[in-house]
Amino acid sequence: MATVRVVHRQRALWRQCHRTTAIGICHLHTTTSSSSSSHASSSKEHYKVLVLGGGSGGITMSARMKRKLGAENVAIVEPSEMHYYQPIWTLVGAGAKGVASSGRPTASVVPSGVKWVRSKVQEINPDTNTVRTGNGMEISYQYLIVALGLQLHYEKIKGLPEIEDWVKFKIGSNYSVQTVEKTWSALQNFKEGNAVFSFPNTPVKCAGAPQKIMYLTDAYLRKTGKRAKANVVYNTSLPVLFGVKKYADALWEIVKSRDIQVNLRQNLIEVRADKQEAVFENLDNPGETKVFEYEMLHVTPPMGPNPVVKGSLLADEAGWLDVNKETLQHNKYPNVFGIGDCTNLPTSKTAAAVAAQSSILDRTISKVLKNEKPDSKYDGYTSCPLVTNYNAVILAEFDYSGQPLETFPIDQSKERWTMYHMKADVMPHLYWHGLLKGFWGGPGPYRKIMHLGMK
């Protein structure tokens, strides 16, 4: 059995933060480019549209606003030199793709002519329509698009920040560029014992990702003849395996057929690397914990609101950007808009959600520019290609109500190699050349065609 003993402990103290930008995928970004730069202090600039964040939401909206208003009227604030397509990290962690394929210089994705301010956002003041950056600039705007992503909090897991050599202690995480290859190392070095996978007790981006790597680990261990000596254990803080019943039912069949142990309402609170132990709290009985010995540990970190958004007047009580769930316009400041992971939209935080949101937000802003009432409505569409093997994917698509909203006229709860090909090869191309260029707004129009206008 994976459980070694039950003990009682207090929650770990919370310390430093680990930042990521973006939206359904989170990005660390930037680079050198002629299309932008600013190294000034105490300078002031003004733009008709100011975009905060250079992740998928920020880049696609910059491209759309450039076409709508002209590049000279648009600026984007983003400190990172590299932009990453994070959905592919699931396959990187399983050795099916290389990490280099996931990143490109930010300079190559910022729309040409759009001013790129290479700095962090320090403060947002919607009452004065200004933003202060880390390099001392004050930028005023007529319209503000917030796409700052969310924050990863590895430091909230006791013992994890002190571990300098994750490879040595067989720990990985597909949620950051610094740790995704360590997942592959842990998988390759697996000999026998427990392969443990966690899902935190917080909102996360791509809620399917923590279990995708679990299925791929199971497949890899079978392929390499190690599965008989392995226990694959998925400890999730959720009360369900997946939030949409149609897909959850299909996934339960898979975990049963592959002898994968699923433990609900278990939250990772501590890693004892020297003993190769992971401590989980039982959320249904707070204070009670179980200790799992591991031969491989995949950590999905707790996540939370972007601290700049949380510290501003734009946040709701929980710290997320407070926007209208249908128009993506801010609920208090009508010249402020949001997209992606930083928002309080009650849907799964994915790149697919950003794509659908971008087309709605484009039309919302067009209406606002004409002093008209926004009439396009975002239905909460999001998608999660659930990778269940090195050649199989269940393509989950659903809306705000948690009801399937499938593009293809087939049962998408079935494992299919065609959907794996779409995940591994088609979607990255669509991301770089469609979404980031502002041309891909989700599969809505194609869904209507596929279903003969019935959806």
Image (spheres, rainbow, N blue to C red):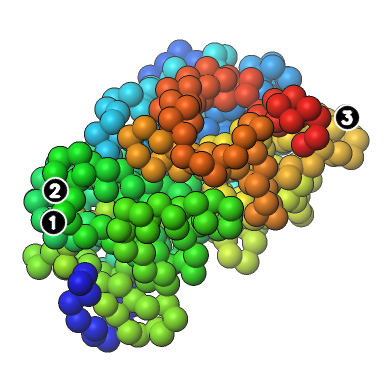
- Judge the density around disc 3: few (<14), some (14-19), many (≥20) Cα neighbours within 10 Å: few
- Dot placed on the residue nearer the N-terminal end, 1 or 3: 1
**Dots 2 and 1: beta carbons under 8 Å?**
yes
Q: x, y (%) of residue 374?
A: 85, 39
Q: CA distance from mark 1 to mark 3?
A: 65 Å
Label 2 secondary element: loop
Q: x, y (%) of residue 225?
A: 14, 44
Q: CA distance from mark 2 to mark 1?
A: 6 Å
Reading the image, the residue beneath label 2 is 226
**Dots 2 and 3: beta carbons under 8 Å?**
no
> Amino acid type of disc 3?
Lys
The numbered disc on residue 282 is: none
The numbered disc on residue 229 is: 1
Label 3 secondary element: loop
The numbered disc on residue 370 is: 3
Asked which quadrant contains residue 357, the reply is: top right
Residue 421 as seen in the image, left or right of residue 437: left
Residue at image position (74%, 24%) is: 449
In the image shown, does 111 or 360 lie closer to the viewer?
360
> Amino acid type of disc 1?
Lys
Quarter of the figure that contains the N terminus: bottom left
Image position of 452 with respect to 7: above or below = above
Give the mark toward the camera: 2 or 3: 2
> Amino acid type of disc 2?
Lys
